[in-house]
Image (cartoon, rainbow, N blue to C red):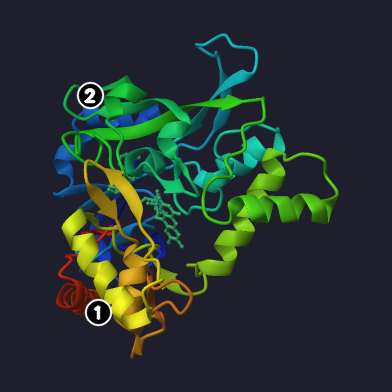
Amino acid sequence: MKISWHHSLLGHNTFGMNVSCACYAEYDSEAELTAFFAEGGQSALPKPFLHIGAGSNLLFTGDFPGTVFHSGIKFIREVPDRTGAPEKLSVEAGAGTPWDEFCLWCAERGLWGPENLSGIPGETGAAAVQNIGAYGVEFQDVVSAVRCFDAVTCSVKTIRKADCRYGYRDSVFKQSAKGRYIVVSVIMELSRRAVPRLGYGHVRAAAEAALSETGQESLTPGLMRKVILDIRNSKLPDPAEIGNAGSFFKNPVVPRSSYDRVENYARSRYGQDYAVPHFDAGSGFIKIPAAWLIEQCGWKGFRDGNVGVHDRQPLVLVNLTGKASPDEIIALEKKIIASVYDIFGIGLHPEVEHI
Ligand SMILES: Cc1cc2nc3c(=O)[nH]c(=O)nc-3n(C[C@H](O)[C@H](O)[C@H](O)COP(=O)(O)OP(=O)(O)OC[C@H]3O[C@@H](n4cnc5c(N)ncnc54)[C@H](O)[C@@H]3O)c2cc1C
């Protein structure tokens, strides 16, 4: 275990918060992690413990008083496929493998599965925790099992997908197992047979345009990946250029009566034909894009000193100057929540985890 005291976290969070932790501990293998805990090495480290990936979904609200762990387990390898189906291939990736490296690896080999999730920042272990999602696909559509180190029993166990309790940006690792399981690797089931997923937003139109531009007869995972990366790059700020943690708020899921109020507001403002973007969430509930609500409140492109709201995607709060403090981000977050509540009576909740 590589241990460093009073370690800066500036390079470990994409928001660019200039904070530090009392102790930073990084390991390179499952064996190293297991031996460290089995020998009681953790008892000498300051608490609380926090395991991070690339810090692309975190807002550090100040210096962290305990120990931050990070996985350096990086590999991608084929493993025996439990289905035995000729078109299937099982692949295992270490938790510290950058997620997009895994997507690229699949695309280069013509393997279908994660292509719509291309370009999402962060590491593979965190992808399993977050159930990342984009363009109509979620991590749970690709994974078959997650291997975890159990800090209580000091052993590694394999958790089948069904037991990961995946939901919208949610999993057992964010709920009852939080703090107990450290993801060490993930096993994914890929397909050699073409299974493009085109149903979300403008993805089909963009894929058709890419086919006619390239003269290719049919879609490949590589071309789908390019289509998705082009869409993402046109909308989302690159954290290497401007600090951010992606979508700051979750899309609210509201009862029909709340949605009706929003629709009345929009039609009185834009005319009776106006269609509020929304998705049926089942059981009489409606999901409304938080980005739309925030934009209606006039926040898109807002700037105030070191912080702002992205001018192409109002769901993304940004560290404009690279010098923003956690308090400045939190003050902006509170103002946005208050204004959406004042106008629509809907409470927004952060997707970004506050530490
Ligand atoms: C520009 C931008 C675009 C984004 N777009 C998307 C998108 O389209 N879809 C989407 O779903 N997300 C998106 N995100 C959010 C983010 O990239 C994902 O949530 C990602 O999975 C976080 O990975 P990370 O490695 O940075 O994890 P971190 O932010 O470091 O951690 C996330 C959580 O996982 C836990 N964790 C990390 N590693 C482990 C481990 N090995 N074992 C146990 N727990 C662990 C942490 O404790 C924390 O609770 C975006 C972010 C940015 C900055």
- Mark 1 crowd level (few <14, some 14–19, many ≥20, 10 Å Cα): some
Q: Residue at x 52, y 46 (%)?
A: 117
Q: Is residue 27 visible?
A: no
Judge left or right: residue 330 versus residue 15.
left
**Displayed quadrant of residue 19:** bottom left
Please state the total of marks drawn on the protein image: 2
Q: Secondary structure at mark 2?
A: loop
142 and 211: which one is in front?
211
Q: Amino acid at mark 1?
A: Leu
Q: Residue furthest top?
A: 84
Q: Position of residue 58 (x, y in %)?
A: 30, 59
Q: Position of residue 169 (x, y in %)?
A: 32, 46
**Displayed quadrant of residue 199:** top right
Residue 332: which numbered mark, if any?
1
Which residue is under mark 2? Answer: 154
Ligand 1 under 8 Å from disc 1 Cβ: no
Q: Between tags 2 and 1, which lies in front?
A: 1
Q: Residue at x 32, y 28 (%)?
A: 148
Judge left or right: residue 57 versus residue 342.
right
Q: Residue at x 26, y 75 (%)?
A: 265
The Cα–Cα distance between marks 2 and 1, rounded to whole angstroms, is 42 Å
Q: Quadrant of the N terminus?
A: top left
Of label 2 and label 1, which has the lower sequence position? Answer: 2
Q: Is residue 281 visible?
A: yes
Is residue 354 placed above or below 82 in the rendered structure?
A: below
50 and 166: which one is in front?
166
Q: Residue furthest front?
A: 272
